[in-house]
């Protein structure tokens, strides 16, 4: 009888242990699921300091290659992955250089010929209202239309020169936006992008879309670039877009009496990019009153970046009874070079002219406004800011005229800041070429 009770006790303990095992497994699963959800919820966009990154694929090219005379085995590939890990749309190109062009040839790259004139855009004013510039003799404008809608346009888009044949498909960049054409004075045709559609938010044009649309006349292939168009890492496209660009090479000659040679391949990445920041700021129409307030002006420090190589690092705010003033500090934090976006074709190592200090460290003030208000803030400088070449930093001072008369309470609202620029970084791969025969 005692043995039976002992067996029953052991069976009970066994069942209890088995139940505990299932319970612990379930608990562990819940904990893992919770942790996974926490990791998912902690995944923030519009953070970081990178834009379009590139990586050479393994073995393409290999670190050691062989020359076999006129055999087909002299061909090889340089294959590069480009990934948009930032938060802006990116349009750019890769350029391959650094190698001996008398020894190695790449399909589509002929540095012995002149690549032609560059596409240069000099903008007189960016903002609401018209501005003039030159891009293959075209005239751009950005402003508010007759019906109060926000518009951006290019006059003479379909002129007899045919300069914009094969231009970018804007429906991918500005999907759902009203795109139309209308006749203006004389025989000019005006191309317009209208945000009159109630379903389209003006902020949809941010995040690099409007930037790329404005500068679609840039032709990277003119200076032997292989182009790409990549969407950023956002809520609409988690993880960002990527592409693979391949350069087909061939070892065509070999110096006599040479057993081996080292060659370096430089891959230069040049692209248009935008920085979008929308920190909450406190608008106080009566800053000196003793009324209870929901907020007070505070300093904004962008320690985590905005998912772009040029960052809004600091905003100092000061309120007056008529306006709110903002000192916006920006800085190049991506480790590359900032180009005037209208002169980005100069980024190519095959550009026929000399790149000067005037062509670099230029950041356009694409958009500065209080969210929900179409009125662009009055800024100094209003068009572009030149970054200090030593520190990579610059300051924009903007003022916002408070539109609500009689309002005594303060309120929080996003301050939208979008910066436009060209960006460039270069990487290299060293290879050893040995003579096989």
Image: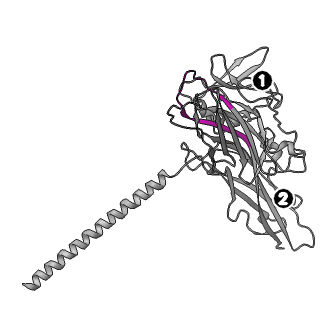
Give coordinates of residue 167: x percent, y percent: 72, 34
Question: How are the colours assigned in the image?
Answer: one colour
Q: Is residue 5 above or below residue 279?
A: below
Residue 188 visible in this rendered orientation of the protein: yes
- Residue on which disc 2 sits: 98
* Displayed quadrant of residue 64: bottom right
* Displayed quadrant of residue 8: bottom left
Q: Tag 1's secondary structure?
A: loop
Q: Of helix, strand and loop, which mostly describes the magenta segment?
A: strand
Q: Residue reaching furthest left?
A: 1
Give coordinates of residue 219: x percent, y percent: 78, 40
Give coordinates of residue 184: x percent, y percent: 74, 16
- Residue on which disc 1 sits: 156
Q: Is residue 346 above or below residue 188?
A: below
Front in this rendered view, residue 197 or 432: 197
Magenta segment range?
399-421
Taking the image as shown, residue 281 lies to the left or right of residue 100, namely: left
Q: Tag 2's secondary structure?
A: loop
Front in this rendered view, residue 173 or 285: 285
Q: Residue reaching furthest top?
A: 186
- Disc 1 crowd rating (10 Å Cα; few below 14, some 14-19, many 20+) is many
Disc 2 or 1, which lies upstream in sequence? 2
**Residue 3 lies in magenta, yes or no?**
no
- Disc 2 crowd rating (10 Å Cα; few below 14, some 14-19, many 20+) is few
Front in this rendered view, residue 169 or 355: 355
* Displayed quadrant of residue 317: top right
Give coordinates of residue 324: x percent, y percent: 64, 32
**Residue 417 lies in magenta, yes or no?**
yes
Q: Is residue 343 above or below residue 369?
A: below
């Amino acid at each position: 009888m005692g043995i039976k009770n002992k067996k029953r006790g052991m069976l009970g303990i066994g069942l209890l242990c088995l139940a505990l095992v299932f319970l612990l497994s379930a608990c562990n699963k819940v904990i893992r699921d919770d942790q996974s959800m926490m990791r998912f919820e902690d995944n923030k966009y519009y953070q970081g300091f990178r834009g379009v990154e590139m990586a050479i694929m393994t073995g393409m090219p290999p670190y050691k290659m062989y020359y076999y005379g006129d055999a087909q085995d002299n061909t090889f590939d340089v294959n590069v992955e480009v990934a948009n890990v930032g938060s802006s749309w990116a349009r750019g190109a890769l350029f391959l250089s650094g190698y001996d062009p008398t020894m190695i040839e790449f399909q589509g790259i002929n540095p012995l010929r002149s690549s032609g004139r560059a596409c240069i855009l000099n903008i007189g004013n960016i903002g609401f209202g018209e501005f003039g510039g030159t891009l293959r003799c075209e005239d751009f404008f950005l402003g508010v239309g007759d019906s109060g809608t926000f518009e951006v346009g290019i006059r003479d888009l379909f002129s007899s020169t045919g300069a914009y044949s094969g231009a970018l498909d804007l429906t991918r960049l500005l999907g759902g936006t009203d795109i139309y054409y209308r006749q203006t004075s004389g025989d000019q045709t005006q191309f317009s992008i209208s945000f009159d559609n109630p379903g389209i938010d003006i902020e949809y044009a941010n995040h690099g879309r409007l930037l790329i649309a404005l500068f679609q006349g840039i032709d990277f292939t003119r200076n032997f670039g292989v182009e790409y168009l990549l969407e950023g890492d956002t809520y609409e496209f988690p993880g960002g877009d990527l592409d693979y660009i391949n350069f087909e090479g061939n070892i065509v000659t070999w110096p006599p009496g040479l057993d081996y040679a080292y060659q370096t391949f430089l891959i230069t990445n040049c692209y248009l990019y935008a920085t979008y920041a929308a920190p909450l700021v406190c608008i106080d129409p009566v800053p000196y009153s003793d009324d209870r307030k929901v907020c007070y002006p505070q300093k904004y420090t962008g320690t985590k970046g905005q998912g772009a190589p040029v960052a809004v690092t600091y905003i100092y705010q000061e309120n007056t009874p008529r306006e709110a003033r903002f000192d916006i500090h920006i800085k190049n934090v991506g480790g590359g070079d900032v180009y005037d976006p209208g002169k980005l074709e100069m980024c190519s190592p095959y550009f026929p002219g000399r790149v000067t200090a005037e062509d670099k460290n230029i950041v356009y003030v694409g958009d500065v406004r209080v969210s929900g208000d179409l009125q662009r803030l009055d800024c100094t400088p209003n068009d572009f800011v030149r970054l200090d070449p030593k520190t990579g930093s610059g300051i924009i001072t903007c003022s916002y005229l408070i539109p609500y008369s009689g309002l005594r309470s303060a309120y929080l609202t996003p301050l939208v800041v979008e910066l436009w620029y060209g960006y460039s970084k270069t990487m290299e791969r060293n290879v050893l070429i040995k003579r096989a025969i």
